[in-house]
Amino acid sequence: QVQLQESGPGLVKPSETLSLTCTVSGGSVRSHYWSWIRQPPGKRLEWIAYIYYSGSTYYNPSLKSRVTISVDPSKNQFSLNLTSVTAADTAVYYCARLPAAPYYFDYWGQGTLVTVSS
Amino acid sequence: EIVMTQSPATLSVSPGERATLSCRASQSLGSDLAWYQQKPGQAPRLLIYGASTRATDIPARFSGSGFGTEFTLTISSLESEDFAVYYCQQYNNWPETFGQGTKVEIK
């Protein structure tokens, strides 16, 4: 059974960089696509980015200028960096797997709340 | 990007009754639609993909239908664990987008 676990700071100051890591167990990041999705309080889910282990990346155009996704096969992890954050970036951030791309998300992490506040 | 619209926003149903949730896309998706269930404090759980294919270990009381721009998720006989928020998601066009959700609550 594939399991994903997000980790990273729960509080980030405005204008700083939000950095999260997703650790994958029960499967390898060397197959499938790996994604970040967020859900601001009371709002719908928003896809942020996904990556294939080869390094191919895809970003939501609305966030592309501020987002970087990367993968570390040696640690079986992938990561998200979101720069110049504002209060609008406050959300629960999920990591997830896709069998292909674009596609549905078949495995999800539990999610981590990141609050942007001074 | 494709806009997904779900209705109703809230559905009040008694246990044992049937629930019908709708999802509409702003342009045709073919069958490239998924449904998720989300309970408070939990991650979304994949229920249906390809508009009508149940994901692994999903009970048969969940069924999906539709094609193009109109889709339906039906829960044939609601059980207590089914009260949750349900989201649709399209993957026909990049970027993938989600509906705003339908909350199924106990009547």
Image (tube, coloured by chain):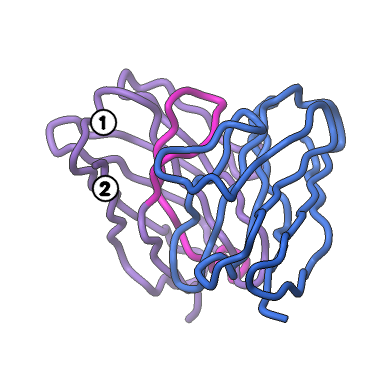
Q: Residue furthest left?
A: A74
The picture places residue B85, in percent across and down from the top left corner, at: 62, 64
Q: For the residue labelled by badge 1, is the local secondary structure a helix, a strand or a loop?
A: loop
**Chain seen in purple:** A
Q: Is residue A115 magenta?
A: no
Q: Residue at x 50, y 73 (%)?
A: B40
Find disc 1 in the rendering and name its residue.
A29
- Kind of residue at badge 2: Gln
Whether tag 2 and tag 1 are in contact, CB under 8 A, the answer is no
Which quarter of the image is occupied by the N terminus of chain A? top left
Bounds of the magenta span?
A: A86-108
What chain does mark 1 sit on? A
Q: For the residue labelled by badge 2, is the local secondary structure a helix, a strand or a loop?
A: strand
Find disc 2 in the rendering and name its residue.
A3
Q: Is residue A105 magenta?
A: yes
Q: Residue at x 56, y 26 (%)?
A: A102
Q: Residue at x 64, y 57 (%)?
A: B86
The picture places residue A23, in percent across and down from the top left corner, at: 23, 47
The picture places residue A99, in percent across and down from the top left corner, at: 42, 27
Q: Is residue B50 left or right of residue B10?
A: left
Picture quadrant of residue A30: top left
- Kind of residue at badge 1: Val
User: Callout 1: 10 Å neighbours few (<14), some, many (20+)?
Assistant: many
**Chain seen in blue:** B
| Along the viewing direction, whichever of B65 and A72 lies nearer the viewer | B65
Number of marks in the rendered image: 2
